[in-house]
Image: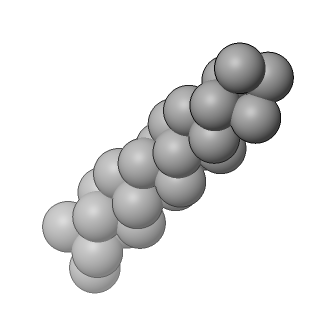
Amino acid sequence: MEQTVVDKDSQLKVNDLEMRVSDLRGYL
């Protein structure tokens, strides 16, 4: 159970980072 929660949390962080990178590329 706990491992699954951590997995989801890290997945959200990765998605957030990817979104930020996409935004930066859009500005460049």
Position of residue 6 in the picture relative to residue 15 (left or right): right
Q: What is the image's colouring?
A: one colour
Position of residue 10 in the picture relative to residue 20 (left or right): right
| Residue 26 % position (x, y) | 20, 67
Counting the numbered discs, the total is 0
Quadrant location, the N terminus: top right
Q: Residue furthest left?
A: 26
**Against 20, is 3 above or below?**
above
Residue 16 can be seen, yes or no:
yes
17 or 1: nearer the viewer: 1
Position of residue 17 in the picture relative to residue 2 (left or right): left
| Residue 15 % position (x, y) | 42, 48
Quadrant location, the C terminus: bottom left
Q: Which residue lies furthest to the front in this view?
A: 1
Residue 27 can be seen, yes or no:
no
| The quadrant where residue 24 appears | bottom left
| Residue 8 % position (x, y) | 56, 32
Position of residue 7 in the picture relative to residue 20 (left or right): right
| The quadrant where residue 7 appears | top right
Give the residue drawn at x 28%, y 75%: 25
1 or 25: nearer the viewer: 1
| Residue 3 % position (x, y) | 76, 35
Give the residue drawn at x 40%, y 60%: 18
